[in-house]
Amino acid sequence: MAEITVEATEVPAQLPQVRVAVLGAGKMGGILLQAFLKQHLFAPDQIHATVAHTERALALSTQWGVDVSTNNLEAAKQSDLILLGVKPLQVPGLIAEIRPALTTKKTLVSFAASVKTSAIEEYAGMEIAVVRAMPNTPSALGAGAAALCRGRFVSAEQMELAERIFETVGRTVTVDEKHMDAVTGLSGSGPAYVYLIIESLAEAGVKVGLPRDIATQLAAQTVFGSAKMVIETGYHPALLKDMVTTPGGCTVDGILELEEGGLRVTLIKAVMRATERAKQLAAG
Ligand SMILES: NC(=O)c1ccc[n+]([C@@H]2O[C@H](COP(=O)([O-])OP(=O)(O)OC[C@H]3O[C@@H](n4cnc5c(N)ncnc54)[C@H](OP(=O)(O)O)[C@@H]3O)[C@@H](O)[C@H]2O)c1
């Protein structure tokens, strides 16, 4: 798959006193790390990252200009804020590996789906601050949606720091931990649903005679613009839909087809299924 290039939005103040580790700098961890660099949130020498494979560590180290290794313990030792970016099932092993480096002064931020803050506290075996986050891939363009929740030992200051981190890559909300699997099913997985919708709209454009590149641009910009309308006007989506739907016009015919095809129910069921799956991930 092509590498995602991260674009910066605005430049927040640097956090010169914080040293950060991204353990598991894969797709999501890599997006966050690159955003930190682009936004100058952390200087390159404040960041330590790890991956599983040595060759990949070398390549990423050259690409990003930061220390990337396979040594989780060393990276954790050198950091105050430790981001956990491995797959859910790998979290217990990773914590066991870095445990000698953990102290109650450090903050763990996990964005592994499904893994509860209480489980991470337990693996760590101490009263350590654990923030759980669920970001999504549009974070690469500063247009991410992330939900955060706090473990039992997180101070206001530590929560603020975690929020700052995710605000560099998009919109951030704080929720109760009981909602985190729902967030995973909605906005964590959501970009995939929306890509499917854009792909289908573009295919439809081709079907009615538009060149594919034009159809894709129109479809993507329409989704982008409509999302912007919902966010920036604050109007209910139904009201915005009514504004497009002229009585006796063509949009209402299109909507009728969508209703008959069960678009709403299908999307609702997709989020429900993904939420259910999110509940199981940490258990394998
Ligand atoms: N992708 C998303 O849209 C998304 C959204 C929200 C949350 N998440 C969460 O983010 C986490 C990672 O997902 P991803 O999609 O980014 O997967 P990914 O691209 O496979 O990234 C996982 C990374 O972990 C590294 N890794 C594996 N074992 C390791 C170990 N023992 N020590 C250090 N690094 C290790 C891998 O290294 P190598 O590269 O060398 O194999 C890889 O770089 C998951 O828990 C997922 O739930 C993902």
Image: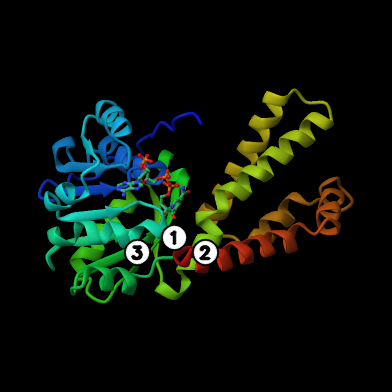
Q: Nearer the viewer, mark 3 or mark 2?
A: 2
Q: Amino acid at mark 1?
A: Ala
Secondary structure found at label 2:
helix
Mark 1 vs ligand 1: CB below 8 Å:
yes
Could you give the CA–CA distance between mark 3 and mark 1, rounded to whole angstroms? 9 Å
Rendered location of residue 218, percent (x, y): 67, 33
Secondary structure found at label 1:
loop
Callouts 2 and 1 close, C-beta under 8 Å = yes
Rendered location of residue 217, percent (x, y): 64, 30
Q: Reply above or below: 257 against 207.
A: below
Q: Amino acid at mark 2?
A: Ala
Q: Earlier in the sequence, mark 3 or mark 2?
A: 3
Q: Nearer the viewer, residue 98 or 21?
A: 98
Rendered location of residue 194, percent (x, y): 62, 47
Q: Reply above or below: 164 against 275.
A: above
Q: Residue at x 62, y 37 (%)?
A: 220
Q: Which residue is mark 1?
A: 113
Callouts 3 and 2 close, C-beta under 8 Å = no
Q: Which mark is residue 69?
A: none
Q: Which residue is mark 3?
A: 132
Q: Nearer the viewer, mark 3 or mark 1?
A: 1
Q: Which residue is mark 2?
A: 278
Relative placement, left or right, of 8 versus 114 is left
Q: Reply above or below: 211 against 45.
A: above
Q: Nearer the viewer, residue 225 or 270?
A: 270
